[in-house]
Amino acid sequence: MELHDDAFWQGQFSRPAQRMGSAMTRELWKVAGRPGIISLAGGTPSPDLLPVELLRQVSDKVLREQGQRALQYSLTEGLPELREWIASRFAGATPDNVQITTGSQQALGLVAQTLLNPGDKVIVESPSYLGAFQAFNVSMPEYLAAPMDGDGLLVDELEPLLAQRPKFIYVLPNFQNPSGATLSLERRQKLVEMARAYRVPILEDDAYHYLSFDGVTLPTLYDLDHRLGGGNVIHTSTFSKTVAPGLRVAWVVGPKVAVGKICQMKQGSDSMTPTFSQLLVREVAPLIEAEFVPRIRAKYKLHCEVMLEALRQHLPLARYSVPKGGMFFWLELPRGINTLELLDAAVAQGTVFVPGSTFYPDGSGHHTLRLSFSNASPDNIRLGVERLGKAVESMAVTRP
Amino acid sequence: MTDFSKLFASRMQRVQASTIREILKLTAQPGFISFAGGLPAADLFPVAEMREASNRILETQGTVALQYSTTEGHPGLREWVARRMPGATIDHVQITSGSQQGLDFLGKLFMEKGAKIAVEAPTYLGALSSFNPYEPDYVSIPMDDEGMIPEALEAALKAHALRLIYVLPTFQNPSGRLMGLERRRVIVELGRKYGVPILEDDAYAELYFDGQPLPTLYALDHAQGGGNVIYSSTASKTLAPGLRVAWVVAPREVIAKLVFIKQGADLHTPTFNQMLVYEVLKDEAFFAGQIARVRSTYQRRRDWMLSALQRFMPEDMRWIVPQGGMFFFLSGAAGLDSMKLLEAAVAEKMAFVPGEPFFADGTGKNTLRLSFSSASQEQIEEGIKRLGKATHKLLGREVKE
């Protein structure tokens, strides 16, 4: 018997920590790892896309040529050569505009901690990335949910939310996680202008930037803002979707004042992103657009087509738009079906997905769900969707 | 355009660029000798073993190493950590991206405006940087040569509802002090008696030169029934800091929350790096040899620095001889201003860290920290000579040759 019970610890914990913890998704990942379960839940890259042999050669080279540097502490800002490479890809940016982070997950948390006092308002898309809520919640904001359609955020409905003086607007403009929606060029333009007019910064999460199936990539909000004079968009993206997520290397590009503060926050958070991981990424960075991205696009496009066909066959009740990139299908089922309950039925059939309500700041969206096609093989995608179809049927049968 | 300085959260007032960091940027010039950084010696990094391990891992488990992994951390590594802590299982271990991240997480978990935290005076500056964004109030506990003074801690425990007691019992950064066994027992008992958890930062645990390691506060607490000590340590001082692999060992209620905090903070520590560290640590013979090399090298460097201090520093400058770790901590005569001394030292092309920032209560103006971990004999000799010269000059005394 240990000295303290749970109530004691709760009493010692801070308010945000007391509230923390949604057991559902953590249980979900455990189930997803069970043998025999086909997981359509995680947004993890396909294992065959990971450049294993290349990274083996590169690791060997880095440790041979600059082993002591790779294993030593380095600057909190990130390695100069990596910041330079990233800056070169953003109009008007210099290395001083770039902060390296340990995954873009860290970038979200650092931006929130830098800007948010408890009770401050943040505009988020509804639905939005689950991990962003986890990153933001530590700073105890109040969420203002902005509605979306198949072309992303409904920019025309933003005005009343902007009038409530939020601290920032969090947007995933490309192949949004979870909805798969891409913000149209016209809406991007308008969003950037409105945000400038209201002096409310945009936090642009562009993790899926390169994952368009047809190779069409719209200008970033960062770029559109830059054309208007710049200084109002903090942009984050990552090497997790293009190189490998297990390295945990991502970045923030933004106005110098903001990036400087984010760096000071990072210093106390984890000192720096691993030197070794940054060196590996820098070595392979020139290959991303020429070699990695075309392979990734072709593969995910194929996976998406396979899933579409399977959905047509096994889930006639579901409504969805066909994604033009990214890793996800977003499904709306008939309103009577609660996808939290459906998850249990799906586990019984041998597949898992992520229930949609976890992506809504207000916990609504009970009839929605997210399916990922990035990680499973085409055969498993077909089988997983078939199992999901059976789970939906079993719900429909048992429902009074 | 947007004036971000008006948008920053109020916590950012306690998150500022340090003037010392700015001064230390000057030390990158050629000919400069710096004892400021607490960097482990790069020539001791097991580069060849890491290289072999990296080839092995990517040849046999490449898709695992490069993929997302569980938030708690690599099971083998957690198991390795748990085995060294009495009573701990894998479920008591969370892997973090450096022990700095562990400190930040414990800040998120225990601290908020008005929360009172006991810290040693002086304490680890990096911990204060981790804790500051959560805006706690520090209660500074004075130390003697054996560490935190128990009577002072007990007085603080009586006077305040403390959330946490933060202690570095072994070769403390910055003071180099080692808390004795009896003192350890008393501190653990005080924590239990008043029901205030202890955070034990044991980053320098393996770096003892003479004698035998003392039991951790975690182990002493376990002997009393356990559950009141949260333990933090790292692979940064024994293997290499550039991989950012460290761990927290704690009661399950604490680990359960740390997992959520970690998930929100960065999902997990890089998979590949955890596998690399595990691959090298689990080779017991190699790891024992590695630690022995680090110990003997640092001990030699300490001896060089001690001898130079005795020769070049004024008689009234005090220090204890560290029995391990990476630092000498010097106290000057009252009236010595170590910020002014730093300016004088920089003029002589040498640098150190003034002690004041390590004191949460703003005292310690007459103290300074010198790191001996990565300097050569010549650098130590020449650097301390320059420091001695700067000190004598500042005090208006004749320079010792």
Image (spheres, coloured by chain):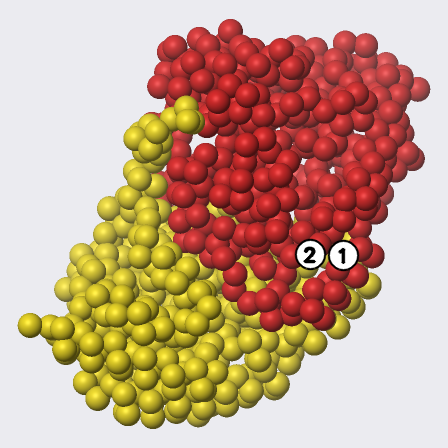
Residue beneath disc 2:
B276
In the displayed structure, does residue B233 sit left or right of residue A371? right
Height in image: B84 above or below B45?
above
Kind of residue indicated by mark 2: Leu
Tell which chain the image draws in yellow: A
Q: Position of residue A377 (x, y in %)?
A: 48, 83
Q: Give percent across and percent down for residue B92.
A: 50, 40
Check the picture and name the quadrant holding the N terminus of chain B.
bottom left
In the image, are marks 2 and 1 on the same chain?
Answer: yes
Q: Dot 2, how many residues are within 10 Å of its Cα: few (below 14), some (14-19), or many (20+)?
A: many
Residue in the foreground of this view, choosing between A34 and B377 = A34
Q: Counting residues from the N terminus, which is met first, the one under dot 2 or under dot 1?
A: 1
Residue B315: where, in percent of width, then height?
81, 10
Q: Chain of mark 2?
A: B
Where residue B50 is drawn, which disc sits there? Answer: 1
Circles 2, 1 touching at the beta carbon (< 8 Å):
yes
The amino acid type found where label 1 is placed reads Met
Which residue is at the front of the view, B30 or A354?
A354
Q: Which chain is red?
A: B
